[in-house]
Image: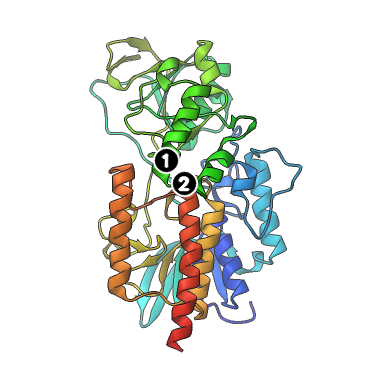
């Protein structure tokens, strides 16, 4: 790099690369630290810490997932697989000259305040590395530390595995498989198991809305996107839920538990294939687990089944182990951040990608990165601290009303948040101009 870095970016997945690109556009020198030996983060199948499995595809459509600065090829399928997405991120890095700014095989161990800036401690192939910078951007993702459930009553003699360690259907071949969870990975793995396993059970403690990837001949997220630009979410909820009921019917039609919350009040679960496999009996739905007894599992409705493998698709814990716990308050997943980006009490500490979106992540981290770059370039200024805190409280109230206690600090509505970041960037530029 031609100048010493002013910013350290932790991670070189989609969020880290978007941050490097935005900082470069703003003329702010930066360095990124990446644990793996390649760019791309979770999309790189087989990379250290990546949860990617061989059958992984996007669950948001290509047009709603791509970076604004780097469209995906028009001849790609609507839902590309992990190989294409990893290649796309590599092409993004090459197009914008980002590779030289990334230190691969460098794990950040500790980030500490140092005077008016920050000191980043990392371990690389040649030993410890220390860098002093003005600002740190945390972009290391939150799908790396498996959330393993508390033990159930009884003893489980079946093999147990978390979805983080799942790589392909060969791990399921000839087994009696119990998949536990209602997210996208659970649905993908249950479908894989239905073709490879002797028997496949899918256990859900609570109901979820399962959305086909296509509705009315179009990628389903494009329909909600069109509504989002015109209607409040409550009205979108009624329209979308009516459309789902008319086209695929209620989840109970497939033996799944009825959702406790309306559509758009949780992360959508997308699957074209699961509902078909349920109706053919190749996947059998079960409610939550009551207890284990050797290789037998009893469910809350009293049914008992024998299983060889329990595959926990129970999500991930949000951890930022290299930061002082005092900076994280009640935890990284409960940290109030102005516009889900800026730490309220630690100038120069920002987060890109610490959120859970109703849609794709790439456009949102791209917009967050532009906000960070503008602040560090001096072209964007935040409001007064009390107004930042008030904005966080208002966002939390609205998120709790919509999503309850399911990580409300991290929840964002894809279209509404993208529009909010555009407005924030413009408002902050006006504030910066007035301050000069």
Vertical side of 309 occupied by 360: above or below: below
Answer few, some or many: residues within 10 Å of disc 1's Cα (few below 14, many 20 plus, some between 14 and 19): few
> Could you tell me if residue 341 is visible in this image?
yes
Measured as percent of width and height from the top left, residue 238 is found at 42, 34
Estimate the spatial distance between the alpha carbons at disc 2 and disc 1, rounded to whole Å: 6 Å
The quadrant in which the N terminus is found is: bottom right
Secondary structure category for the residue under label 2: loop
What residue is rendered at 59% in x and 75% in y?
Answer: 26
Q: Name the residue under label 1.
A: 235
Quadrant location of residue 192? top right
Residue 261: assigned label: none
Q: Name the residue under label 2.
A: 231
Measured as percent of width and height from the top left, residue 289 is found at 30, 21
In the rendered image, the residue lying farthest to the bottom is 436
Vertical side of 160 occupied by 393: above or below: below
Q: In this view, does 187 lie to the left or right of 265?
A: right
Total label count? 2
> Could you tell me if residue 35 is visible in this image?
no
In the rendered image, the residue lying farthest to the right is 75
Measured as percent of width and height from the top left, residue 324 is found at 31, 65
Secondary structure category for the residue under label 1: helix
Q: In this view, does 76 lie to the left or right of 16?
A: right
Vertical side of 424 occupied by 417: above or below: above
Q: How is the image coloured?
A: rainbow
Answer few, some or many: residues within 10 Å of disc 2's Cα (few below 14, many 20 plus, some between 14 and 19): few
Measured as percent of width and height from the top left, residue 93 is found at 66, 60
What residue is rendered at 46% in x and 81% in y?
Answer: 432
Pointers 2 and 1 in contact (C-beta within 8 Å): yes
Q: In this view, does 42 lie to the left or right of 346?
A: right
What residue is rendered at 46% in x and 67% in y?
Answer: 424
């Amino acid at each position: 790099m031609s100048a010493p870095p002013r910013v350290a970016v932790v991670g070189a997945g989609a969020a880290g690369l978007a941050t490097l690109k935005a900082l470069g556009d703003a003329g702010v020198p930066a360095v990124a630290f990446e644990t793996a030996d390649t760019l791309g983060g979770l999309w790189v199948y087989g990379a250290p810490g990546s949860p990617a499995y061989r059958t992984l595809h996007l669950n948001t459509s290509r047009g709603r997932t791509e970076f604004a600065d780097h469209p995906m090829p028009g001849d790609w399928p609507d839902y590309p697989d992990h190989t294409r997405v990893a290649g796309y991120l590599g092409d993004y890095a090459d197009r914008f000259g980002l590779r030289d700014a990334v230190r691969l095989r460098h794990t950040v161990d500790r980030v500490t305040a140092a005077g008016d800036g920050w000191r980043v401690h990392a371990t690389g192939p040649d030993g410890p590395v220390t860098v002093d910078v003005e600002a740190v951007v945390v972009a290391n993702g939150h799908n790396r530390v498996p959330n393993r459930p508390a033990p159930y009553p009884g003893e489980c003699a079946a093999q147990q595995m978390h979805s983080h360690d799942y790589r392909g259907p060969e791990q399921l071949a000839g087994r009696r498989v119990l998949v536990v969870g209602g997210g996208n990975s659970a649905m993908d793995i249950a479908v894989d198991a239905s073709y490879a396993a002797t028997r496949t059970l899918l256990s859900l403690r609570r109901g979820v809305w399962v959305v086909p990837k296509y509705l009315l001949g179009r990628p389903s997220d494009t329909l909600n996107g069109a509504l989002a630009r015109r209607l409040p979410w409550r009205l979108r909820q009624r329209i979308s839920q009516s459309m789902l009921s008319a086209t695929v019917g209620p989840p109970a039609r497939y033996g799944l538990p009825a959702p406790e919350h309306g559509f758009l009040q949780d992360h959508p679960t997308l699957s074209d294939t699961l509902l078909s496999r349920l109706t053919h009996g190749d996947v059998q739905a079960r409610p939550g687990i009551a207890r284990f007894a050797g290789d037998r599992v009893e469910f809350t409705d009293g049914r008992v089944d024998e299983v060889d493998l329990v595959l926990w698709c129970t999500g991930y814990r949000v951890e930022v182990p290299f930061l002082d716990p005092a900076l994280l308050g009640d935890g990284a997943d409960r940290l109030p951040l102005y516009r889900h980006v800026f730490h309220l009490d630690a100038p120069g500490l920002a987060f890109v990608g610490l959120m859970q979106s109703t849609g794709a992540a790439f456009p949102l981290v791209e917009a967050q990165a532009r906000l960070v770059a503008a602040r560090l370039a001096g072209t964007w200024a935040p409001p007064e601290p009390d107004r930042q805190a008030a904005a966080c409280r208002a966002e939390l109230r609205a998120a709790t009303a919509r999503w309850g206690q399911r990580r409300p600090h991290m929840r964002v509505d894809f279209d509404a948040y993208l529009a909010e970041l555009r407005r924030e960037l413009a408002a902050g530029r006006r504030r910066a101009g007035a301050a000069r």
